[in-house]
Image (tube, helix red, strand yellow):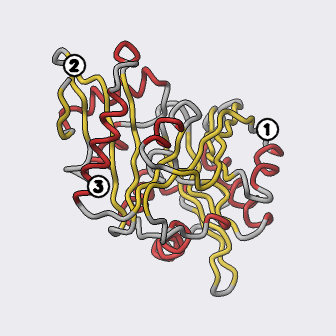
Amino acid sequence: MNLRVMTRADIPAGMRLKELAGWNQTVEDWKRFLQSSPDGCFVAEAEGEVCGTATTIVYENRFAWIGMVLVDPKHRGHGIGTRLLERTIEHLDARGIPAMKLDATPQGKPIYEKLGFVTDYEIERWTLERRAGTPSARHTIKPDFDQIAEADRNVFGADRGSLLASLNQSAPEFTLAIRRGDDMAAYSLGRRGTRADHLGPWMAQDESAGREILDEFLLCSGRETIFVDCMKSNPFAEALLRSHHFKFARPLTRMVRGSNVNPGRPDLLCAILGPEFG
């Protein structure tokens, strides 16, 4: 097996692996990883074929995100995923990044724990299946993007404005915000994936604002399938999703390795951006 830095020429191989896993990412998402971290995304090769991937994104040198840990099913059980994770950790340690974060599936969690990751909090994937409709919107809560980026820096714990700007450019209809006086009461962005539209990040200071954002997002989408990665601890997000007929799909665990001195404000989140981005 050979490990090397991922390039744009490897995107088709990455798409093949994510399709085998049934994930939702697009070619544009892979480009986001490579643009954010051209030296920090890796592939594993076996018999001349890409058989695994792992990506990193560094946010303001405060912490890094590890995602897209994928291994071809026919090559699993040989330690490829673990070696890719070790390579990302080596890369980030060499850069002096004080903390690394990721979202783990139940199957991956024991592997991450062996590498020094500890549980931060729990997340749940919720899915809506509905009849496709014509996208529409009330256009009453269109935002100032810079204000969203500023609010998100506090909520997330680091600046990710360039990443959010890319999402906003690709799907501006999903960029929503509610202001009450000088306060950002709620905001959201979203992505159009290969399998579903994905709501996140979704922040709301109260249930009323959270409901308004969710209602508007669902109008703007019109897609048959919607994904939301909901904060399990949020006091109202799950009830809002249930009221719109979302169903629980799978659990995730937010994990951290290193000094988590920039935790952000997860108490304000209804849903994260996504396991691959944070």
Secondary-structure class at tag 3? helix
**Residue 146 in picture, x, y percent from top left:** 45, 75
Mark 2 sits on what residue? 46
Instruction: Inspect the image, locate mark 1, and give the three-letter code of the amino acid beneath it.
Output: His
Left or right relative to 182: residue 71: left
In-front residue for pair 210/112: 112
Horizontal side, residue 137 vs residue 161: left or right: right
Tell me what residue is drawn at x 38 percent, y 68 percent: 62
Disc 2, disc 1: CB below 8 Å? Answer: no
Three-letter residue code for mark 2: Ala
- Name the residue nearer the viewer: 253 or 259: 259
Horizontal and vertical percent for residue 14?
31, 30
> Which quarter of the rendering shows the N terminus?
top left
Residue position for label 1: 245
**Residue in view at x 18 percent, y 14 percent:** 47
Q: CA distance from mark 2 to mark 1?
A: 43 Å
**Marks 2 and 3, the one that precedes in the sequence:** 2
Q: Residue furthest bottom?
A: 182
Q: Is residue 164 above or below residue 149?
A: above
SS at badge 2: strand
Q: Which label sits in the foreground, 3 or 1?
A: 3
Q: Secondary structure at mark 1?
A: loop
Q: Position of residue 23 (x, y in %)?
A: 48, 31
Residue 48, by quadrant, is top left
Question: Label 3 belongs to which residue?
Answer: 92
As measured in the structure, the alpha-carbon distance from the residue carrying label 2 to the one carrying label 3 is 24 Å
Residue appearing at x 65%, y 34% in the figure: 250
